[in-house]
Amino acid sequence: MSGPALPPGGFEVRGQELMAGGRSVTELAGQAGTPLFIYDGALIARRVSDLRAAMPAGLGLHYAIKANPLPSVVAHLAALVDGLDVASSGELERALATGMAPGRISFAGPGKTDAELRAAALAGITVNLESAGEMRRLAAISAALGIRARVAVRVNPLFELRQSGMRMGGGPRQFGVDEEMVPALLDELAGLSLEFLGFHIFAGSQVLNGEVLIDCLGKTVDLAIRLAADAPAPVRYVNLGGGFGIPYFPGDVALDIGRVGQALAPLLDRARAACPDASFAIELGRYLVGEAGLYVSRVVDRKVSRGKTFLVTDGGLHHHLALSGNFGQVIRKNYPVAIAGRMGVAATETADIVGCLCTPLDRLGDNVALPETAIGDLVVVFQSGAYGASASPSGFLGHAPAAELLV
Ligand SMILES: *Cc1c(COP(=O)(O)O)cnc(C)c1O
């Protein structure tokens, strides 16, 4: 195997076999077929409990479904976390199907249609308002239904989340209401058929530097406290965002959540003193599921082109766009890769691993050090539990979708 002796993500090795959920990946791939995603439910549960142990007591933990919307994964997480965050009516249906109390589900995202707002209002979930226009549409829908929809104001802060993989706050954004416009919006909200709960402040994602996250959480708390002074009612809910990253590439160092939790405790105390009626939560996607997932494809062809060895698999960017380097990355880098039945075997060759699509963009690994690899072998890509199947152009070239398995 290339890279470290222990596989990433906490997966177990027995002999030379990679295991997931107590079963060999070779056996799972033989039964379910390839390509497939495997998600390890025990690793997800361990992740949640480690995180809870590190975070201040009473801080709510929400799962952002967008990271992995597989119904079995969402149901598994629903039993472990305090809330679910959705970003479409499709995700809302999946969230409600888990039995999660509607009061613990929130709906963020620009471009919510009237139908989505109506569904959210009727379900009794919390709508994170992205604009004044959206607020007015929801208020009209609520009034027509004779109810007061539950809302939080999503705030686009003046500050930015530095070193963020995807920045979603600061500067001009399609997300949220600019913080300087929030007091006027709250004035108007007070007269509408809406139940004001609080604020949602999400600055960005995929941060590995704890100091950067702590700095951002501190600014987020300060902003929530400032805005609470203009609120039409006592603030009952503040979603502090998240952005906790996971290591994907060589040189990435895992986030120190112990440190983040320690630094967050006094910030939270300050926030609770200013907003005594409020509950506080963070919302995480990839941090909860990303490391617990594998993408497995089978070598279909092996060829040498002008001195370079290519392993061609039955997988590709139509299942795992991020792996190919085309989901927001500037420079393509390799995810950790191994051969499922040859863990711990010394590398003897260097190969490019590619998918089966007719485009040079379809790369699974560049110059990967591997043990001798043959047709039929299983290429495993780690760190594949988030933004895989659902974040990839599965219709491109008409191949079958990947199987997905929670074990
Ligand atoms: C995408 C998103 C998340 C999840 O981001 P991760 O990087 O997967 O943790 C959380 N909140 C909002 C509002 C999002 O848009």
Image: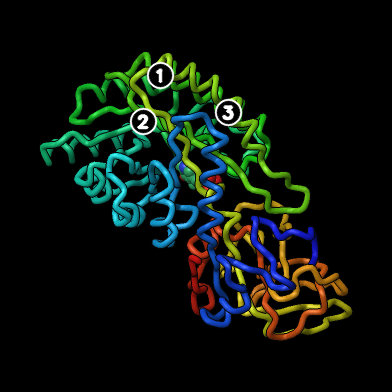
Classify mark 1: residues with Cα within 10 Å, few (<14), some (14-19) or many (20+). some
Q: Position of residue 59 (x, y in %)?
A: 46, 31
Per the rendering, the mark at residue 227 is: 1
Instruction: State the residue position of label 3.
Output: 216
Q: Are marks 2 and 1 in contact (CB under 8 Å)?
A: yes
How far separated are the C-alphas under marks 2 and 1? 10 Å
Q: Amino acid at mark 3?
A: Cys
Q: Residue at x 27, y 27 (%)?
A: 196
Q: Is the residue indicated by label 2 positioned so its CB lies within 8 Å of ligand 1?
A: no
Q: Amino acid at mark 1?
A: Leu
Badge 2 element: strand
Q: Is residue 70 left or right of residue 30?
A: left
Q: Position of residue 326 (x, y in %)?
A: 63, 59
Q: Is residue 148 left or right of residue 325?
A: left
Q: Residue at x 83, y 81 (%)?
A: 305
The mark that comes first in sequence, 3 or 2, is: 2
Instruction: State the residue position of label 2.
Output: 153
Q: Amino acid at mark 2?
A: Val
